[in-house]
Image (cartoon, rainbow, N blue to C red):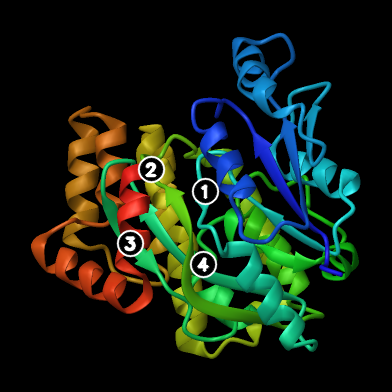
Amino acid sequence: MESMVSVIIPTCKGSDNLPRALNSILEQTYKSLEVIVVDHNEPRSPARQRTEEAMREYLHLNHVKYIRSAKTQDRSAARNIGITESIGSYLCFLNDDDFYLKERIEKSVELLEENPGYEGIICGVLITDEKRVKYLLIPENPIKQRTLLINESILCMGSNLFLSRHAVEVAGGFNELFNHHDINEFMLRVLEDFEILHLEDILIVKSDAGNSDQPNYRYLRKLKELYMLRFEEVIERLDPIERTRFYITQYEELFYAALYSGKKEYIEQSLRELKLFRGITLKDRFNILFNEKHLSRKKIFRTRGPLYDRSKKRVISKQLKNHMDPMVKEDILNII
């Protein structure tokens, strides 16, 4: 008998892409599954109404459950509601603007059941801007606390979480204090007790169309303080170069959040802290100068994004050739 897999989709203002996410689950080669959609839009809002409309064509399916949150909640709370309502031996998560490739669940279950010492798996992810392939994230080694701290993008997003129920329950679910760093904070706790496998196959497509989720500077600062305090002992176990790299990542993100805010006091504060770990670059000065001239904050923040030049396109093409069947690539481009 096949193990039951629960796929949890937290959704908020994502009704346009939600059917694509749902269809990608219903088209899986693995059939012993349930889908739990947790709608954490504000009740009686237009976004809630649009989500209800999108869900109507799926409600007749016995293995699809639609849960409306009674109040506006963040993603961590929505995921925890999904966990409570689920019955699967394995739990995985899918953002409403991402989608799975057809063998995502089958390959994940198969590899985990062939390796009983592991309690989860991460796989390759293809990132698009809804028009083209931007870049790929291919895990090359099993994930550890150390690797997650010094390379926070290794997980990419919540859609890359596939775990045993046991691991999720021991970790205690998602910390609802975090609406940023929520995935990494959760996985760092999972990795305290369990080992996670990696699969190089590209099995998830992530939409990365912008930076609409950029958090408020003061809120982000408090979260980072909490995050660094919670994992202080793990951070101290990093070697000096790795530890410096970790802190650079944290304070660079605060610096860009300060630029996004447009407030001089935040920019000066974040620069002072960043200078403790690295010098101020020409790019930093350029962004500050443009901020002072009151150009678009969003344009400034987007300078962090990956450049799509010809050399990068060649690298992506080579990676796709190595990790993906050409027919699958064509299917993805047709979907997006």
Q: Answer yes or no: do the residues labelled 3 and 2 have beta carbons within 8 Å?
A: no
Mark 3 is on which residue type?
Met
- Residue 335: which disc? 2
Which residue is disc 4 drawn over? Answer: 152
Quarter-of-image position of residue 283: bottom left
Label 4 – label 2 distance at C-alpha = 28 Å
Say which residue appears at 66% left-offset and 81% top-offset: 111
Locate residue 264, reporting x and y percent: 36, 36
How far apart are the two marked residues, 1 and 4, measured between alpha carbons?
21 Å
The residue that label 1 is drawn on is: 99
Cα distance between the residues tagged 1 and 2: 10 Å
Residue drawn at (77%, 77%) of the image: 119
Label 3, label 2: how far apart the Cα atoms are: 13 Å
Left or right: 296, with 201 as reference point: left
Q: Are marks 1 and 2 in contact (CB under 8 Å)?
A: yes
Find the distance from the CA under tag 3 to the CA under tag 1.
17 Å
Callout 2 amino acid: Ile
Q: Position of residue 306 (x, y in %)?
A: 27, 57
Q: Which of the two discs, 3 and 2, sits closer to the camera?
A: 3
Callout 1 environment at 10 Å: few (<14), some (14 to 19), or many (20+)?
A: many
Query: Which numbered disc flags the more N-terminal residue, 1 or 4?
Result: 1
Does residue 91 appear anywhere in the picture? yes
Q: Is the residue 259 above or below the residue 4 in the image?
A: above
Residue at mark 4 to residue at mark 3: CA–CA distance: 31 Å
Q: Earlier in the sequence, mark 3 or mark 2?
A: 3
Does dot 1 land on a helix, a strand or a loop?
strand
